[in-house]
Amino acid sequence: MNRKDQEKFVRDLIATVQKRILAKLPNVPEEWNGMELRWLIGEHFEKAAPYSASKRQEKRYRAYYNETLVRDLF
C-alpha cells in the first residue's frame, strides 16, 4: 500500500466511524462528558478494525506493536 493509499484508507475509516458516532449521538446521555465520549469513540474504532487473536495474526500484531513503540506512533 503506497502512501496515497494509506492516507485514503485512514480518511475513509475515520469518516465512516465519525458518521456512525454522529448518528448515535442523539441517544447519548447529556451528562456524558469527554471521558465517556472517548470510550464510545474508542469502541467504535475497535469495532471498525478489531484485533484478531488467531495464531496467524499474533506474530503480525507483535511486529505492528513493536513498530508503534520504535517509531513513537502514539
Image: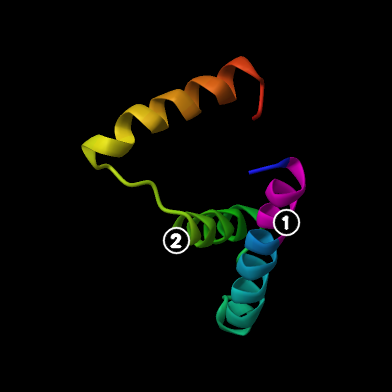
Marked residue nearer the N-terminal end (2 or 1): 1
Front-lying residue, 38 or 59:
59
Q: Quadrant of residue 29?
A: bottom right
Q: Identity of the amino acid at label 2?
A: Lys
Front-lying residue, 39 or 16:
16
Q: Residues within 10 Å of mark 1 (few under 14, many from 20)?
A: few
As drawn, is 53 to the left or to the right of 8?
A: left
What segment carries the magenta color?
3-11
Front-lying residue, 41 or 65:
65
Front-lying residue, 70 or 20:
70
Q: Which mark is residue 8?
A: 1
Instruction: Mark 2 and mark 1 in contact? Answer it, CB < 8 Å.
Output: no
Residue 30 can be seen in this image: no
Q: Secondary structure at mark 2?
A: helix
Residue 23 appears at what percent x and percent y? Answer: 62, 82
Residue 22 sits above or below residue 2 on the image: below
Q: Identity of the amino acid at label 1?
A: Lys
Q: Nearer the viewer, mark 2 or mark 1?
A: 1
Toward the top, the furthest residue is 70
Confirm whether the magenta stretch covers residue 32.
no
What residue is disc 2 on?
A: 47
Q: Secondary structure at mark 1?
A: helix
Q: Quadrant of residue 58?
A: top left
Residue 24 appears at what percent x and percent y? Answer: 58, 79
Q: How is the image coloured?
A: rainbow
What secondary structure predominates along the stretch shown in magenta?
helix
Toward the front, the furthest residue is 2
Name the residue located 27 percent from the left edge and 42 percent from the top edge: 53
Name the residue located 56 percent from the left edge and 82 percent from the top edge: 27
What separation in Å lies between label 2 and label 1 (alpha carbons)? 19 Å
Residue 10 sits above or below residue 32 on the image: above
Quarter in which the C terminus is drawn: top right
